[in-house]
Image (cartoon, coloured by chain):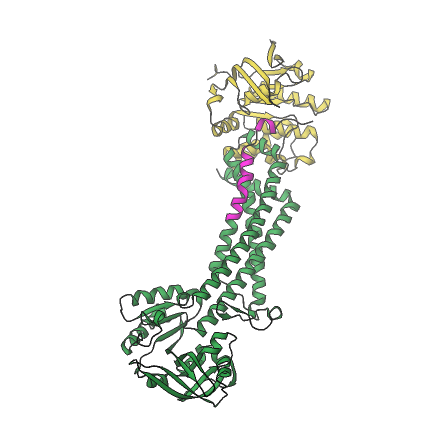
Chain colours: A yellow, B green
Amino acid sequence: MSDIAAVRTDNVWKVFQHDGMSVEAVRGVTITIERGEFVVLAGPSGSGKTTLLNLCGGLTRPSRGGVWIDGEDLTVMRERDLARLRLERVGFVFQDYNLLPVLTAEENAEFTLLLRGMADADRHQRVRDIFEAVGIAGLEDRRPPKLSGGQQQRVAVARAVVGEPALVLADEPTANLDRASSDALLDLMTDLNQQRGTTFVFATHDPRLMERARRLIHLVDGAIDTDDRRA
Amino acid sequence: MNGRLWLVPGLAIRNLRRQARRSLLTALAMVLGVAVLAFARTLGDGAHEDWVDAGVRLGSGHIAMQAPRFQASRDLKDRLSGDARARSTAWLAEPRVAERVVLTASRLEVQGLASSAASAVPIMITGVDPVVEAEFSQLSDRVVEGRYLADGDRLHAFVGTRLAARLELKVGSRLVLSAQDGSGDIASQLVRVAGIFRTGLPEADAGIVHIPLSTAQEWLGVGDAVTTIAVLLESGWVADDVLARLADRADDDPDVAAVGWRQAMPELDAAIRIDDWGDYIFNFVLYGIITLAIVNTVLMSVVYRTREFGVLQALGLTKGETAAVVVTEGMVLTAISGIVGLVLGLAVTWVFFRHGMDYSGMMEGEFEFGGVVMDPVIIPTFRWPQVGRSLGVIAVVGMLASLYPAYRATRIDVAEATKFET
């Protein structure tokens, strides 16, 4: 199992039709991200970072090429199986948190556990532990509008990692946070990566996040420009 | 799996609560719509029951036991013999039938001529048991002069106002009734007017004469035979069931037929069917408006929450579960407001249940429809099967109204929906 990559893409393309024109958002990208990596996808706006992240998470299907998570080919999966795979193996952190406003912080965080059918007691314990770990213990009953941006993003991170997925995909997770909140969040994700071996892939412009990356993939015009591994 | 099972309705109810004002407005429209429909239905059923009751009491009951060809021939030779009459009476006494029967009236009907010094007019002469008929027929309630026939009367007649006018009759006047008797010969009988009635129906007021049954049997020489045993049931709603039982018996008897009021009074049956169609169209339009209101609310809610549905699917909710959330929202909204509307409609029905709804201010004189004179006071009729049907329709409306929004929710592009928007 351990020699299977967390994510692999093979000559993957994503072409959008926009106003009758074809826009190549991702062009022939081939990457392999091993388990436990802490990877940053960087590049200017429109370079294809978010689209590549979505392809890696099975949120969108490639126009050409292949994508594998834990060795499973996403391109041949039915929608239902893809939903199952996202639920069990992938965690998402979105730029604007995307918490569900009708649910409390705790309910947002436990959502994927509910979908997995985890028993109440186990679920609540897991959420309490993760809230403690990400520093938002005591905010369980608050709804998202009653939380600060930093607190909401921590809830989003808690939701992404509470199910202990093999892979966490985060799109500009620090973009809406102040410096202190950003640093705290990055410390948290670095710790989760080091302590739990969770694989993180970020799409970001944030130089502080790039500094922490142990692998920095630079995209230009939908293709890989550089792929640097750091010690 | 408990948590997952509760997830769909839980999300649906919370979403409805979040859009409380919109949900409430839609629910209010539904409550009013369903209440109007429920009340209109009970009022419509009440009106139909009134019409049927008026028709069958003036005519041959909910069910008429007759000789097989009498309905078409109206000829005295197609009469029920004493034996056939006894068999019919026995069937009517069977438990599953008798429990529905309120009254039976034996009649001897013959087409004939009524004449006086002033004129001669074709009429339908009906020999009746005065005591039973006074309870059965509406004619005894429509006396404008004199009285209805009574036990012990022999050579008395009860005539309509139009006939009285044509023949220049008053209470106590004499007239001659002529008809073909049981052996085919023309026979005449002198009778005296005991009373005059007015139904408001020109054909009844001009063409019906009641005389005592024993007088008619003796005059026409038919022994104890009758042409019709008119059966009055507890309600028109049970007529089809009782008719089926009696028809089943009569199928094996060559001398007896069971005729339902729909067959005996096709014009009334047609009038009720036409009125029913009017109701259906009204219901269809109102339910259509309700459906569109729900579609609008649920669809707006889906469009408003495109991002949320995208997030839910990104996190692992299947498209089927997404659709289930939306359908549940529509169903919950429909069920709650539908049931409240139904209760409200039935509460209004209850208010009018005792004294009825009086339309007399809207009617000038008598209003005839389908061969009966409408009572201007309509008593709404409550029936459980109708409530069951209404609930069924409400459930179907909720389901149908949610399908398109649910479909839209499943077609959301997850990557597009979760994209950051500046």
Q: Taking A108 as reference, is A4 left or right?
A: left
Rendering coords of residue B280 (x, y %): 51, 55
Q: Main secondary structure of the magenta part?
A: helix
Q: Residue at x 62, y 38 (%)?
A: A102
Q: Taking B100 as reference, is B326 left or right?
A: right
Residue B259: name its quadrant: bottom left
Whether residue A126 is situated above or below residue A2 in the rendered picture = below
Rendering coords of residue B5 (x, y %): 50, 40
Q: Taking B104 as reference, is A207 left or right?
A: right
Front residue (pair A50, B82): B82
Q: Taking B150 as reference, is A174 left or right?
A: right
Q: Which residues are magenta?
A: B396-422
Whether residue B40 is situated above or below residue B285 in the rendered picture = below
Task: Tell me if residue B404 is in the magenta stretch.
Answer: yes
Task: Tell me if residue A10 is in the magenta stretch.
Answer: no
Residue A37: name its quadrant: top right
Front residue (pair B254, A9): B254
Work out which quarter of the rendered image holds the C terminus of chain A and state it.
top right
Q: Residue at x 48, y 55 (%)?
A: B389
Q: Is residue B104 visible?
A: yes
Rendering coords of residue B413 (x, y %): 57, 29
Whether residue B410 is situated above or below residue B14 in the rendered picture = above
Rendering coords of residue B329 (x, y %): 56, 43
The number of callouts visible is 0
Front residue (pair A69, B48): B48
